[in-house]
Image: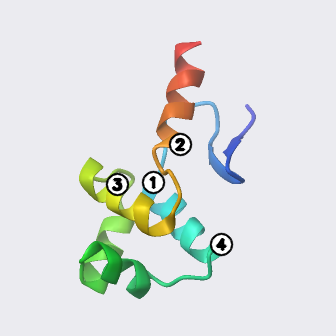
Protein backbone atom coordinates (compact mmCIF):
# COMPACT_ATOMS: atom_id res chain seq x y z
CA UNK A 1 0.00 0.00 0.00
CA UNK A 2 1.30 3.42 -0.87
CA UNK A 3 0.88 6.64 1.06
CA UNK A 4 -1.01 9.59 -0.39
CA UNK A 5 0.32 13.12 -0.12
CA UNK A 6 -1.72 16.32 -0.42
CA UNK A 7 0.00 19.66 -0.14
CA UNK A 8 3.16 17.86 0.91
CA UNK A 9 1.44 16.17 3.86
CA UNK A 10 0.87 12.44 4.12
CA UNK A 11 -2.84 11.82 4.68
CA UNK A 12 -2.64 8.09 5.14
CA UNK A 13 -2.23 4.84 3.39
CA UNK A 14 -4.98 3.37 1.24
CA UNK A 15 -7.70 3.58 3.90
CA UNK A 16 -10.22 6.09 5.19
CA UNK A 17 -8.26 7.20 8.25
CA UNK A 18 -7.41 10.89 8.44
CA UNK A 19 -6.07 12.26 11.72
CA UNK A 20 -6.86 15.92 11.17
CA UNK A 21 -5.32 16.97 14.49
CA UNK A 22 -1.93 15.61 13.43
CA UNK A 23 -2.24 17.29 10.05
CA UNK A 24 -3.00 20.63 11.73
CA UNK A 25 0.00 20.25 14.04
CA UNK A 26 2.21 19.48 11.05
CA UNK A 27 0.92 22.54 9.20
CA UNK A 28 1.56 24.71 12.28
CA UNK A 29 5.11 23.37 12.39
CA UNK A 30 5.64 24.07 8.68
CA UNK A 31 4.46 27.65 9.20
CA UNK A 32 6.60 27.96 12.35
CA UNK A 33 3.53 28.86 14.38
CA UNK A 34 2.53 27.77 17.87
CA UNK A 35 -0.62 26.27 19.32
CA UNK A 36 -0.94 29.49 21.36
CA UNK A 37 -0.96 31.48 18.11
CA UNK A 38 -3.71 29.30 16.66
CA UNK A 39 -5.72 29.18 19.90
CA UNK A 40 -5.87 32.97 19.96
CA UNK A 41 -7.16 33.11 16.39
CA UNK A 42 -9.88 30.50 16.89
CA UNK A 43 -10.78 31.78 20.37
CA UNK A 44 -9.90 28.66 22.34
CA UNK A 45 -7.70 28.23 25.38
CA UNK A 46 -4.31 26.66 24.72
CA UNK A 47 -5.21 23.59 26.76
CA UNK A 48 -8.62 23.28 25.09
CA UNK A 49 -7.09 23.42 21.63
CA UNK A 50 -4.38 20.90 22.61
CA UNK A 51 -7.10 18.44 23.65
CA UNK A 52 -8.99 18.99 20.41
CA UNK A 53 -5.88 18.47 18.27
CA UNK A 54 -5.37 15.03 19.81
CA UNK A 55 -8.60 13.96 18.14
CA UNK A 56 -8.75 12.40 14.71
CA UNK A 57 -11.86 14.44 13.83
CA UNK A 58 -13.08 18.01 14.38
CA UNK A 59 -16.28 19.99 14.22
CA UNK A 60 -16.77 21.51 10.76
CA UNK A 61 -17.10 25.07 12.08
CA UNK A 62 -13.80 24.78 13.95
CA UNK A 63 -12.14 23.28 10.89
CA UNK A 64 -13.23 26.32 8.87
CA UNK A 65 -11.78 28.69 11.49
CA UNK A 66 -8.49 26.79 11.62
CA UNK A 67 -8.32 26.68 7.81
CA UNK A 68 -8.79 30.45 7.70
CA UNK A 69 -6.17 31.07 10.39
CA UNK A 70 -3.62 28.86 8.64
CA UNK A 71 -4.64 30.10 5.18
CA UNK A 72 -4.80 26.45 4.16
CA UNK A 73 -7.84 24.45 3.06
CA UNK A 74 -7.91 21.55 5.52
CA UNK A 75 -10.99 20.12 3.82
CA UNK A 76 -8.80 19.10 0.87
CA UNK A 77 -7.64 16.06 2.85
CA UNK A 78 -11.21 14.81 3.09
CA UNK A 79 -12.16 15.58 -0.50
CA UNK A 80 -9.00 13.85 -1.76
CA UNK A 81 -9.78 10.84 0.40
CA UNK A 82 -13.37 10.79 -0.92
CA UNK A 83 -12.18 10.91 -4.53
CA UNK A 84 -9.88 7.93 -3.92
CA UNK A 85 -12.69 5.90 -2.35
CA UNK A 86 -15.27 6.85 -4.99
CA UNK A 87 -13.10 5.74 -7.91
**SS state under label 1:** helix
In this rendering, the label closer to the viewer, 3 or 1 = 3
Q: Secondary structure at mark 4?
A: helix
Image quarter (top left, top right, bottom left or bottom right) of the C terminus: top right
* Distance between the alpha carbons at the discs numbered 2 and 1: 8 Å
Foreground label between 3 and 4: 3
* Alpha carbons under labels 4 and 1: distance apart: 15 Å
Q: Earlier in the sequence, mark 2 or mark 3?
A: 3
Task: Answer above or below: position of 69 versus 80.
Answer: below
- Residue 77 has which mark? 2
> Does 82 sit left or right of 61 as displayed?
right
Q: Which quarter of the rendering shows the N terminus?
A: top right
User: Residue 56 appears at what percent x and percent y?
Assistant: 39, 53
Marks 4 and 1 in Cβ contact (< 8 Å):
no
Find disc 3 in the rendering and name its residue: 64
- Place of residue 39 in the rendered image (x, y in percent of width and height, measured from the top left): 33, 79
Residue at the spot 66% in from the left edge and 45% down from the top edge: 6
Query: Mark 1 and mark 2 in contact (Cβ < 8 Å)?
Result: yes
Q: Which residue is mark 1?
A: 20
Q: How many marks?
A: 4
Q: CA distance from mark 3 to mark 1?
A: 12 Å
The secondary element bearing badge 3 is classed as: helix
Kindly identify which numbered label has been placed on residue 30.
4
Q: Which sits earlier in the primary sequence, circle 3 or circle 1? A: 1
Residue for point 39% across, 87% down: 36
Q: CA distance from mark 3 to mark 4?
A: 19 Å
Amino acid sequence: MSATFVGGLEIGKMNTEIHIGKLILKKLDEQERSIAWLAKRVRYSNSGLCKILKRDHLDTELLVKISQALKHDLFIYYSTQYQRIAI
